[in-house]
Amino acid sequence: MTINEIINTTATTLGPADIAPILGCDPQTLREMAVSDPEALAPLQPIRLGKRVRFPRMRFLAWYYGERYLADQMMVHDWLNYVPECEYDPEQK
């Protein structure tokens, strides 16, 4: 899929084959990383369903475009459903 196709789809999750072309990697690499090194994919919040791996579409777009995309395109309650809470500490560097 292209990024425009991902934006326009109604799917709530994406498969490794959907996002691999955008990331420039093989879909199997994403599947293997979700099992062997899930921390490396933590920003994309992979979901493992047995042997299947899915990625929340809105979380992927948030990572791809940054928070500005979601602030412009989503309602606040949708944002809270897809992005985990985080604490901002201005003293932390």
Image (tube, rainbow, N blue to C red):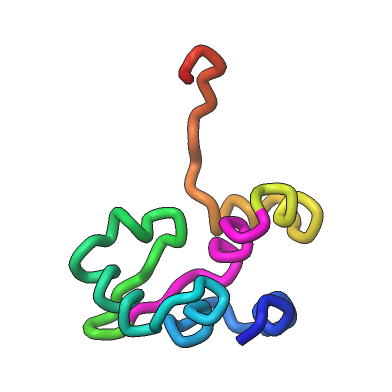
Magenta residue span? 53-65
Q: Front-most of 34 and 80?
A: 34
Q: Is residue 55 left or right of residue 3?
A: left
Q: Nearer the viewer, residue 37 or 80?
A: 37
> Within the magenta stretch, is there residue 52?
no
Picture layout, residue 60 above or below residue 19: above
The spot of residue 61 in percent (x, y) is: 62, 64
| Residue 30 image-quadrant placement | bottom left
40 relative to 20, above or below: above
Q: Residue at x 49, y 36 (%)?
A: 86
Farthest residue, direction front: 24
Please provide percent x and percent y for residue 45.
41, 61
Percent across and percent down for residue 11 are: 60, 83
Query: Going by the picture, which residue comes out furthest to the top?
Result: 91
Say left or right for 67 vs 89. right
Check the picture and name the quadrant holding the N terminus: bottom right
Which residue does the image show at 47% across and 18% down from the upper left? 92
Front position in the image: 92 or 79: 92
Question: Residue sitting at 53 percent across and 52 percent down?
Answer: 83
Q: Residue at x 71, y 75 (%)?
A: 7
In the rendered image, which quarter is residue 49 located in? bottom left
Magenta stretch secondary structure, dominant: helix
Residue lying furthest right in this view? 72
Task: State the count of labels.
Answer: 0
